[in-house]
Amino acid sequence: MKALAVAVLSSALVLAGCGDSGTDGASGTDGAERMPVTAAFYPLQFVAERVGGDLVEVSTLTRPGTEPHDLELTPKAVAQLSQAKAVLYLAGFQPAVDDAVKTQAADAALDVTQPANLIVTGADDGHDHAGESADEHAGHAADGVVDLHFWLDPTRMAAVATTVGERFAKADPANAATYTANAAALASDLTTLDEEFTAGLKTCESKELVTGHAAFGYLATRYGLGQEGIAGISPDAEPDAAALRDLVSHVRESGVSTVYAETLVSPALAETIARETGAKVAVLDPLEGLTDASPGSDYLEVMRANLMTLREGQGCS
């Protein structure tokens, strides 16, 4: 009986240790408590991990393989936001996160909209309106939507990294110098990535970029390409039959040889356009979340894989 009592007590202690620890902070291998940080989706998670290093414990609200636009939060996830010292999010990208931040993490929240320097595009129809006349562009102004996919421009990611470093330094002044140094190192890596894209896409036969949805506007603008999205800025903004016919005609007339499908989104529409035009289908990763199918283990690797895909698809020498 005594042995049984000891066994039961030992089991109880083990089970107690397996409970949910929330986001109160975790201890590293050195025993020091880490600052709890929450990131809304993958690109912000990547920045938080690089800037915070071993000083932070980063959790993400968007699980790998989940389409971030469609995120719904459990009551537990919402409640745990109040325990984070910093919550990184992008206002307007995930409505559920916006609502949760307002109620649970207003003081800890960092909306990266300002450093990302977002732009307003034309109507959410997937088309690039940069070549329109002033009157034509004005006609779309009332229907304008904000393009939120800033992270596909490395220079905008670098600006966000700097701001995150400043916020972490404010939340944890004792380690401010480390956060500042880490943010600078990440910004340097992103500058190098930008230089690689600039050189790699400088001499391409085709400047027309036809993508699964209009997520690549910042990348296209940065590197001298024109974007035509099959769907709009949101993957849910699917084209009607007339828009698909127009896009098929555009692909044929422009001599586009590659149509890009995406991870996390069905390739059916891209495959349909490719079949109608004789183009081939390649896959670009919009980096809204990593999956087992992602062509890399982090933001930098996937972006470099995207560059290789673009160089082949656009006929870059």
Image (tube, helix red, strand yellow):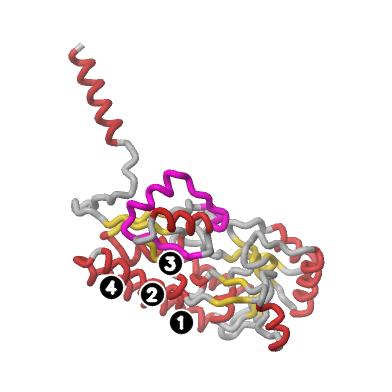
- Packing grade of label 2 (10 A; few <14, some 14-19, many >=20) is some
Report x, y in % for residue 241: 80, 64
Q: Which is nearer the N-term, disc 1 or disc 3?
A: 3
Categorize mark 1 by other alpha carbons within 10 Å: few (<14), some (14-19), many (20+).
Answer: few
The numbered dot on residue 111 is 3
Q: CA distance from mark 4 to mark 1?
A: 23 Å
Which of the image's four quarters has the N terminus?
top left
Q: Is residue 88 magenta?
A: yes
Q: Earlier in the sequence, mark 1 or mark 2?
A: 2
Give the residue type at disc 4: Thr
SS class, disc 2:
helix
Q: CA distance from mark 2 to mark 3?
A: 23 Å
Q: Taking the image as drawn, is residue 228 in sight?
A: no
**Residue 92: x %, y % from top left:** 53, 64
Q: Nearer the viewer, residue 29 or 307?
A: 29
Q: Is residue 195 left or right of residue 178?
A: right
Q: CA distance from mark 3 to mark 4?
A: 19 Å
Give percent across and percent down for residue 199: 51, 83
Q: Which residue is mark 4?
A: 180
The quarter of the displayed image where residue 148 is located: bottom right
- Magenta-highlighted residues: 65-91
- Mark 1 to mark 3 CA distance (whole Å): 27 Å
Return the mark for residue 195.
1
Q: Residue at x 78, y 79 (%)?
A: 253
- For residue 189, which numbered disc appears in the image? 2
